[in-house]
Image (tube, helix red, strand yellow):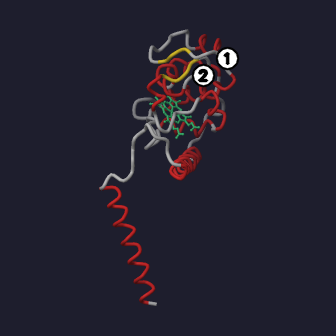
């Protein structure tokens, strides 16, 4: 029994030392020019989804996300989110194409998340992805307005997007081929 426990202990120590050596010797390639391996991607995606779902469960959403709230969230979306997440009629900014993970097109991805989950994610951001936390610089009210706008993105045409953001372009984005 003692030998068995000793064996487990020795294996754990070897694993720990191996990990420390791997980190110190630069064994992990952090270059964003390479895609994540499928195991790393699974670990990140699963951690991300479970954490955002857990965070969203602690948020109490307003009863309704009104058109007025969405209208107030349009300009902040264009200013703070579009370069990374694109928009109807717009591609990501060219530099955002170099991010790993690549920020998803919210015109599609927004439909997959509950409003409380989008709120939690925008407020707290996500470590190890490049998704910023907007909570330190924005009130909950500002963030709910952005959430109301984001939830309308999947159904929005490029014309509606331009109207709601009053056509103010950010120079970082290249106009997209119309989708
Ligand atoms: C600097 C680039 C950047 C900016 C600016 C940014 N995000 Fe993100 N966002 C990311 C990245 C990277 C992810 C994580 C993608 C992943 O892990 O798959 C992400 C994830 C998300 C997700 C989850 C999407 C999914 O299905 O994975 C939502 C929703 C989101 N961001 C909303 C916003 C909103 C709203 C704003 C503006 C207030 C914003 N983001 C600003 C980079 C950005």
Q: In this view, does 12 lie above or below 86?
A: below
The residue nearer to you, when weighing 151 against 32, is 32
Residue at the spot 56% in from the left edge and 26% down from the top edge: 145
Between residue 173 and residue 144, name the one nearer to us.
Answer: 173
Position of residue 57 measured from the top left corner of the image (x, y, whole percent):
59, 47
- Return the residue nearer the eye: 167 or 83: 83
**Circle 2 residues within 10 Å: few <14, some 14–19, many ≥20:** many
The circle on residue 157 is: 1
Label number found at residue 70: 2
Q: In terms of image quadrants, where is residue 8? A: bottom left
Q: What element carries label 1?
A: loop
Are the residues flagged by discs 2 and 1 in contact, CB closer than 8 Å? no
Distance between the Cα atoms at labels 2 and 1?
15 Å
Depicted 86 relative to depicted 52: above or below: above
Residue at x-position 65% and y-position 37%: 112
* Residue at image point 49% right, 45% down: 36
Taking the view exactly as shown, the residue that stands out farthest to the left is 24
Q: Position of residue 110 (x, y in %)?
A: 62, 32
In the rendered structure, find residue 103 and report the number of the disc placed on it: none
Who is closer to the viewer here, 118 or 87? 87
- Image quarter in which the C terminus is found: top right
Q: Residues within 10 Å of mark 1 (few under 14, many from 20)?
A: some
Q: Position of residue 51 (x, y in %)?
A: 53, 49
Q: Is mark 2 within 8 Å of ligand 1?
A: no
Secondary-structure class at tag 2: helix
Q: Where is residue 46 in the image (x, y as percent from the top left)?
A: 57, 50
Disc 1 C-beta below 8 A from ligand 1: no
Please tell me how many numbered marks the rendered image carries. 2
What residue occupies the far bottom of the structure in this picture? 1
Compare marks 2 and 1 and give the one earlier in the sequence: 2
2 vs 1, front mark: 1
């Amino acid at each position: 029994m003692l030998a068995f426990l000793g064996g487990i202990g020795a294996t754990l120590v070897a694993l720990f030392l191996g990990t420390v050596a791997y980190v110190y010797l630069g064994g992990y390639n952090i270059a964003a020019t390479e895609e994540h391996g499928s195991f790393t991607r699974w670990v990140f995606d699963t951690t991300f989804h479970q954490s955002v779902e857990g965070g969203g469960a602690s948020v109490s959403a307003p009863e309704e996300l009104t058109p007025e709230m969405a209208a107030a969230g349009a300009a902040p979306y264009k200013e703070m989110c579009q370069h990374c997440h694109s928009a109807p009629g717009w591609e990501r900014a060219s530099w955002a194409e170099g991010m790993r993970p690549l920020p998803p097109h919210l015109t599609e991805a927004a439909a997959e998340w509950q409003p409380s989950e989008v709120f939690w994610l925008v407020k707290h951001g996500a470590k190890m992805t490049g998704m910023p936390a907007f909570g330190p610089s924005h009130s909950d009210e500002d963030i709910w307005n952005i959430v109301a706008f984001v939830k309308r993105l999947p159904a929005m045409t490029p014309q509606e997007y331009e109207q709601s953001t009053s056509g103010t372009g950010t120079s970082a984005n290249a106009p997209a081929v119309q989708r």
